[in-house]
Image: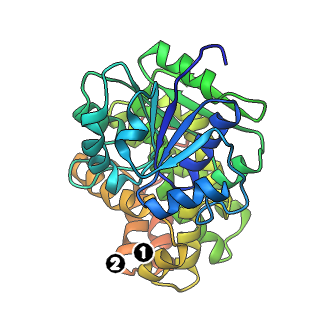
Amino acid sequence: MSKTVKHVAVLGGGSFGTVIANMMAEKGVPVHFWMRDAKRAAEVNSSRLNTRYIPDYPLSPSLHATADLEEAITGAEVVFVSVPSNAFRSVMLKAEPFLKPDQLLISTTKGIEAGTFSLMSEIICDVCPASAVGVLSGPNLAKEIAQRQLTASVVASTDAALRNRIQDLLGSAYFRVYASSDTYGVELGGTLKNIYAIAAGLSVALGMGENTKSMLITRSLAEMSRFAVSMGANPMTFLGLAGVGDLIVTCTSPLSRNFRVGYALGSGKTLDQAVAELGEVAEGVNTLHQVRDKALEKEIYMPLVSGLYEVVFNGAPVTAVVKGMMLNVQNSDVEFVLPRDEG
């Protein structure tokens, strides 16, 4: 490491929190790994495995699991927050008394807070307004990182020193970190793609062909960028890893939790059955609800989101929804090239 560090904290004992924590620990960085469950933390420390999420992934001796939030955070140079979106604010509020303004705070969670439409970096800024904040997002399937498959991600922040520090901490022979100053765009890209992964899983379960998959991914990208720009993001961000890169991997891989939910729905399961079968949080379900409501409020044209919402929450027949979308108004191919009224 180019700079000595007392320790780094990772809050959240799920798949991605585990691999992020262990990547740094393998480089000799002391990592305090916070888990809600004290029994699971003790199991990690004794067995060097997180058996619930990545059972075959040996954990470095430099990783110390704890259920004590104060112990995990106090003195940490960097704090990664890797908890589900529905618990994000509550965890940050519990952590806030132990945080100092000079600690770097990084969200790895891809989701939207119900009720406020806040992204996770915005929650961090609400709770810790004096802190430097960043996000880590990209095509990062945790189980492939655990296998040391070549992977790239994006750290986004307006703070250049933060970006450089995260690149230094996480970069390795198999994990490369690129930088961006478009925090909102990078975070929104990682969040929105979860919706379309559900649609992709659904399409595969229904036996749709390669032409259909290609159309689905490219039109998903158009919708994502259209929505993001209306919210203030840079459309060029969606041509990178946090946009099209993340979209491709989650729409084509059965390792994607949201893809698996869509596949279960396409196989005849109810939403409750699909989520229960997964056994983990699929952020796309909540995100679909939030984005559909926001699109209606801001009058943003999002036919895929609208159609998927009807299928997932109202039980609409997929064939009827697809037919409606195919017969809808034909528009320009590439967003921002041909004005909508000329499509």
Residue named by callout 1: 311
Instruction: Give the SS element for disc 1.
Output: helix
What residue is at 68 percent from the left and 76 percent from the top? 207
Instruction: Give the SS element for disc 2.
Output: helix
How far across and down, in percent of the image, does residue 239 sit? 58, 33
Label 2: few (<14), some or many (≥20) within 10 Å?
few
The amino acid type found where label 2 is placed reads: Asn
In which quadrant is the N terminus drawn?
A: top right
| Residue in the foreground of this view, choosing between 171 and 320 | 171
| Residue in the foreground of this view, choosing between 165 and 276 | 165
Up/down of 103 relative to 309, above or below: above
| Residue in the foreground of this view, choosing between 325 and 155 | 155
Q: Distance from label 2 to label 1 (Cα)?
A: 6 Å
What residue is at 60 percent from the left and 62 percent from the top? 53
Label 1: few (<14), some or many (≥20) within 10 Å?
many
How far across and down, in percent of the image, does residue 55 sit? 68, 63
Q: Is any part of residue 234 visible from this angle?
A: no
Q: Are marks 2 and 1 in contact (CB under 8 Å)?
A: yes
Residue named by callout 2: 314
